[in-house]
Image (cartoon, rainbow, N blue to C red):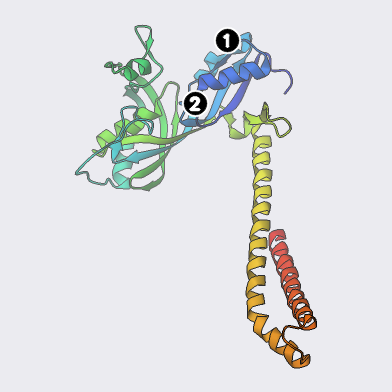
Amino acid sequence: MNNWQDKIVPFWKPIGISSYRLVAMVKRKTGEKKVGHAGTLDPLAEGVLVLGIGRNATRRLADEVKKEKEYLAEVELGAETETYDREGKLKYWENLKKPSREKIEEIIKEKFTGKIKQTPPPYSALKINGQRAYKLARAGKEVSLLSRPAMIKKIEIIDYKYPSLTLKIVTGPGVYIRSIAHDLGRILNTGGYLKLLKRTRVGEFTQSDCFCLSLSNKNGNVIIVTMKEKLGKIKNESQELKKEVGDKITGYITAAFGLIAGLAWNDAIKSLIEYWFPMDKGSLWAKFIYAFVLTLILVIVTVYLVRFFSRKDSE
């Protein structure tokens, strides 16, 4: 896309950067001064982040904020943190009873489906008297946030093997997945925190619709590409790496087999040469014949192995 002005564009935010940081990078790459997003993703989360690029587009972000969101969340039971995710210090629960899948499904249906009251995490971007809650929390000050209504349309257990619980969650706007993980752990009497989070959809936008930031192969600069281009690049790089590693392994195996073959044939070749050419063992002619025969065997073994592994790679 060459013209980014006044466009609503889904981006894929990677793990490790804040939503604000992604917005700042997109500003620099597009040259647009006004860029905003329709719903924060924490630095430890990845997924769809809808951006409004240009003044008119940012005004339309309010409509994007209201749209349905879908997440894939991995909750770790048996411990909790003050941040409600893996960034905080772990506090393990003792004398706990591992909950069954049926018990978790029952609690999810009763406590976490439909319109609920939810208290945001103390480490959040919400403001208290003009200051961000997470800044107050990091300064060691007590953070007290009021509960507020939230709409959770669906929670489905994708996988459960204690202590790991993977959930597919569909929500309305303003829902904190970290709070779901924390509150669920409290009700289960095990503790719980959000270990991994991926936002897979916002409204109609999914990962395949997204743009992302990528390093250019030509000069190493950051460029904007589609996720299809990014995944294609990763696939090509993976195939090149696989070929490089395969070539090295083939070389090592060839050398090893060559050495083994050399050692195995060493005495036999010497005996045959001495039998066919009854000369002094130290004669130059005998040494030449010995070296030639051994080299010929090693070449045959090497050619066979290279052809064998090349055929396996092509398959």
Instruction: Determine the CA span between mark 2 and mark 1.
Output: 19 Å
Residue farthest top in this picture = 129
Helix, strand or loop at label 1? It is: helix
Crowding around mark 2 (Cα neighbors within 10 Å: few <14, some 14 to 19, many 20+) is some
Residue at image mark 2: 68
Crowding around mark 1 (Cα neighbors within 10 Å: few <14, some 14 to 19, many 20+) is few
Q: Position of residue 301 (x, y in %)?
A: 72, 73
Q: Nearer the viewer, residue 206 or 310?
A: 310
Q: Position of residue 40 (x, y in %)?
A: 48, 21
Q: Residue at x 60, y 25 (%)?
A: 10
- Mark whose residue sits in front, 2 or 1: 1
Q: Position of residue 174 (x, y in %)?
A: 42, 21
Residue farthest right in this picture = 285
Checking the image for residue 59, the label placed there is 1
Q: Quadrant of the C terminus?
A: bottom right
Task: Give the left or right position of residue 129, taking residue 60 as reference.
Answer: left
Q: Nearer the viewer, residue 278 or 189?
A: 278
Task: Give the left or right position of residue 150, taking residue 189 as reference.
Answer: right
Helix, strand or loop at label 2? It is: loop
Q: Quadrant of the N terminus?
A: top right
